[in-house]
Image (spheres, rainbow, N blue to C red):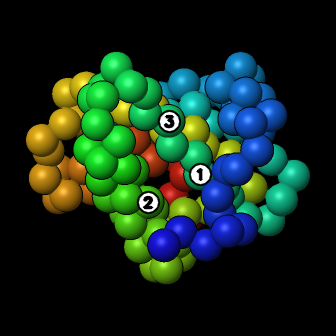
């Protein structure tokens, strides 16, 4: 489970990042990144009903993404002071955990979020 300090929770925080953040994209995922005035980084995940109507499928994808991010925090690879919102495309459905992990690592490196 991703620690509370590393989660974007408030609707206003999501909207702020989505409006003013810098975009980084790949085939399956889209990132919006914005600096914050905190020492830790916070992540939020957005997956709409268009991806899949079933909540169980959407929640499974979010759990996999959170686990990848949690392990990166545990390894102290992600730099602090940024808010990140990750949007999911329909092409991510059916991907294995390893493929999702590679995609996240690629996008975080592209956004220069590794220490």
The one nearer the camera, 90 or 86, is 90
Percent position of residue 101, x then y: 27, 56
Disc 2 crowd, CA 10 A, few/some/many (<14, 14-19, 20+): some
Circles 2 and 1 in contact, beta carbons < 8 Å:
yes
Drawn side of residue 37 relative to residue 72, left or right: right
Q: How far is mark 3 from mark 1, CA to CA?
A: 10 Å
In this rendering, the count of numbered labels is: 3
Residue ID at (14%, 44%): 95
The one nearer the camera, 71 or 1, is 1
Q: Residue furthest right?
A: 37
**Residue position for label 1:** 43
Of labels 3 and 2, earlier in sequence is: 3
Residue ID at (58%, 46%): 44
**Residue position for label 2:** 66
Percent position of residue 45, x then y: 51, 43
Q: Quadrant of residue 15?
A: top right
Assign the C terminus to one quadrant of the image. bottom right
**Residue position for label 3:** 46
Drawn side of residue 20 relative to residue 30, left or right: right
Residue ID at (53%, 69%): 2
Residue ID at (77%, 29%): 16
Q: Is residue 88 visible?
A: yes
């Amino acid at each position: 489970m991703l620690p509370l300090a590393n989660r974007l929770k408030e609707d206003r925080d999501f909207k702020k990042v989505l409006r003013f953040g810098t975009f980084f994209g790949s085939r399956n995922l889209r990132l919006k990144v914005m600096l914050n005035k905190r020492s830790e980084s916070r992540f939020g995940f957005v997956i709409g009903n268009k991806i899949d109507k079933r909540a169980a499928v959407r929640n499974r994808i979010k759990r996999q993404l959170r686990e990848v991010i949690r392990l990166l925090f545990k390894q102290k690879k992600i730099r602090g002071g940024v808010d990140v919102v990750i949007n999911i495309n329909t092409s991510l459905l059916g991907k294995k955990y390893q493929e999702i992990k590679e995609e996240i690592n690629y996008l975080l490196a592209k956004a220069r979020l590794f220490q």
